[in-house]
Image (tube, rainbow, N blue to C red):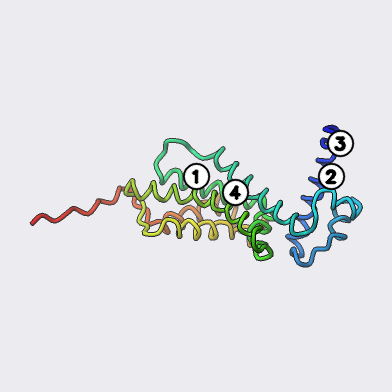
Amino acid sequence: MPNRALREARPTEQAIREAAIQLISKIGFDSMSLRQLATQAGVNPGTLYLYYQGKKELLVSLVLGYLDELLRAWRMSKPLNTGADTTLCAFVDFHVRYHLLRKEEGVLGNMELRNLYGEDLDIVRHARRNYLDEIRTILEQGIGEGLFQCDEPKLLAHILFNTLTHVCSWYRSDGPLSIDEIVAQYSKLTLLMVGYSIRPAPYPTKRTS
């Protein structure tokens, strides 16, 4: 396909992806048909196959797109050369706001993993692991600085990710809490979960005989 045709095709593919995200968030991946997707995107059903071989390939692409953009956005916004407590609060602020503003993507990128198997699931898990490693690195830094009490930073990284991401499943813009208030509550909860101490925790001294 000539370069000009590729450029012209991009808006159509983007329309398909946006329509898929909206449909899946409303009725679920299993319930979505390609005919429904084509109608929602405003294209002929056959046009879908110019971009994706089927529903599973589309889902993998959408989930990977969500994870790649999430990681890119965090790396662009995270503070540099700061203590782990400052970095962790910045991460909570970023992650919660990101998912409150992109609820549909958050639901799709996490709840629909149950529809992936084999190599597709392995690819998505690898991409997800890259983001989880960012959380684990913050936790390990905090442990090293004596600010966090955490025996299993890798496990806690998974727990924090799931806890913070869950916000997109219940948040309502007309609810009693503003986004700033929600971020503040999640920040407090996260600091409790990591056993945060404002003063560095003393390292145990070795007994001398």
Q: Which residue has dot 1 on it? A: 90
**Which tag, 2 or 4, sits closer to the chain's start?**
2
Q: Quick one: SS at disc 2?
A: helix
- Residue 97, disc: 4
Measure the alpha-carbon separation of dots 1 and 4. Answer: 11 Å
**Which tag, 1 or 3, sits closer to the chain's start?**
3
Q: Amino acid at mark 1?
A: Ala
Measure the alpha-carbon separation of dots 2 and 3. Answer: 11 Å
Q: Do labels 1 and 4 touch, CB within 8 Å?
A: no
Q: Amino acid at mark 2?
A: Thr
Residue at image position (74%, 59%) is 56
Residue at image position (85%, 52%) is 48
**Which tag, 2 or 3, sits closer to the chain's start?**
3
Q: Which residue has dot 2 on it? A: 12
Task: Please tell me whether mark 2 or mark 3 is closer to you in this view.
Answer: 3
Q: Amino acid at mark 4?
A: Arg
Q: Quick one: SS at disc 3?
A: helix
Q: Amino acid at mark 3?
A: Ala
